Image (cartoon, rainbow, N blue to C red):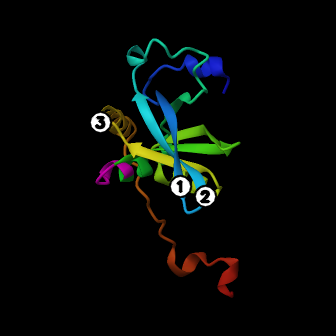
Amino acid sequence: MPKQAELELKKNEHVWPINFRLQAEERQVGRWTTYAWTIEDICLYEEDLAVDITLADIGAGNYMMPLELFRDERMEYRFNLNSQTPHLFFICAEEDEQLKPVLVTAAQGVAARYMDGDYVVLDIDIPLVIQAWMEAFLGRHGELFEFKRKRGGNKKKGRSSGN
């Protein structure tokens, strides 16, 4: 998504733009030095943005990524919201010892798939206003429950049944 388009995102019933900062802290592990990354300075509302965050600052540790909700992930959102501490996941790609955010999601399954693909996944507790927004999304679109189809007994045997 082009930077100009990112900066013009507005909150609606499916998308909530989140401004944040990626903070690296050097840590000594044995003889090696490594970085521990954290999400800092979460800003959920445009009017709360610091005046000094300009277009040039976006990408210099300060980022704006949309949290987008999808109807086919409703079951994962419900699972996350029902947990003791719901989390928001920030998926980042590592480039030249720096992290660059790729995606923000509230679906644990999506975050797990990215972890399997060698991405760095950071998480924070979901702010209460976003939890309420997600609950409203689930209320509008209904809950998605898993169901299993009943097979017609012996009537519908497939090719692999040996018959």
Residue 32: numbered disc: 2
Which percent across, then down, holds residue 96?
71, 42
Quarter of the picture containing the C terminus is: bottom right
- Between residues 90 and 130, which one lies in front from this camera angle? 90
- Label 3: few (<14), some (14–19) or many (≥20) C-alpha neighbours in 10 Å: few
Q: Is residue 102 left or right of residue 42?
A: right
Write the start and end of the magenta stretch as one range: 80-85
The residue to which callout 3 is attached is 128
- Between residues 135 and 105, which one lies in front from this camera angle? 105
Which percent across, then down, holds residue 112?
54, 56
Hey, what amino acid is under mark 3? Leu
Quote the CA–CA distance across marks 1 and 2.
Answer: 6 Å
Magenta span contains residue 142: no
Magenta span contains residue 81: yes
The residue to which callout 1 is attached is 28
Q: Is residue 70 left or right of residue 137?
A: right
Q: Is residue 75 left or right of residue 100?
A: left
Decide which of tag 3 and tag 1 comes sooner along the chain.
Answer: 1
Hey, what amino acid is under mark 2? Trp
